[in-house]
Image (spheres, grey):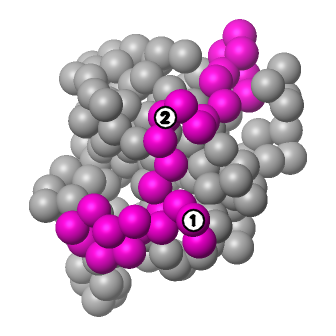
Amino acid sequence: MKVQLDNVDIIICQMVGRMRCMSNKAHGVKERKRSNDKCEKINVEGFMAEYAFCKHFNLFPDFDLKPRSGSYDALYNGYRYDIKSTRHKKGRLIATTKVNPDVDIYILAIINDTEVDFIGYAFKEEFIKPENIKDLGYGDTYVLERDKLHKFKDGHTQEIS
């Protein structure tokens, strides 16, 4: 499932991502990033993925800028989604070991310029378990290979379609 963002979408994502980074820094939020990238880049790309998911499903994105712990990126058909993004073309689904009680499904999104490719998803119970913990150079991290992800069917998760 691929979603193309236009120039206005990109400007919105850049603004919200940068403002989230500034807000987090102003409130002393500890970064739990799993990358060498700067906070601003991670937040812009993360919001691009959230925004693209919402655009595809005709949902209103969460434009909130205040720091938060936990929560989810999108709510659709009763499921709470955490959308994980990367620019690595062969990227895997990864998350910190801080378990988010507010998430049901994790989604892997690959950012390629202005296109967001949603590779697949995993239910929390499939992803957040001890055998999926690895150290990728940034400390313990939940990691799920792409071949273990559920594929989207007709633009929806299989359970939703």
Q: Label 1 vs label 2: CA separation? A: 16 Å
| Residue 16 visible in image | yes
- Amino acid identity at mark 1: Glu
Q: Residue at x 14, y 57 (%)?
A: 37
Q: Is residue 132 magenta?
A: yes
154 drawn magenta = yes
In the rendered image, residue 40, in percent from the top left (x then y), is placed at: 19, 57
Disc sitting over residue 146 in the figure: 2
In the figure, 76 relative to 119: above or below? below
| Label 1 sits on residue | 131
Q: Residue furthest top?
A: 154
Q: Position of residue 83 (x, y in %)?
A: 52, 46
Task: Give residue 133's position: percent from left, percent from top.
Answer: 48, 67
Label 2 is placed on what type of residue?
A: Arg
Instruction: Pick the residue in front: 9 or 73.
Output: 73
Q: Is residue 42 left or right of residue 102?
A: left
Which residue of the protein is positioned furthest toward the bottom in this rendering? 28
User: From the viewer's perspective, is residue 52 above or below residue 73?
Assistant: above
Quadrant in which the C terminus appears: top right
Looking at this view, is 53 or 59 the one in front? 53
- Disc 2 is placed on an element classified as helix
- Per the image, label 1 sits on a secondary structure element best described as helix
In the rendered structure, are the residues bearing label 1 and label 2 in contact, judged by CB atoms less than 8 Å apart? no
Magenta span: 130-157
Frontmost residue, 117 versus 134: 134
In the picture, the quarter occupied by the N terminus is top right
Residue 38 occupies which quadrant of the picture?
Answer: bottom left
Residue under the point 40% across and 42% down: 92
Badge 2: residue crowd in 10 Å (few <14, some 14–19, many ≥20): some
Of residues 21 and 84, which is closer to you in this image? Answer: 84
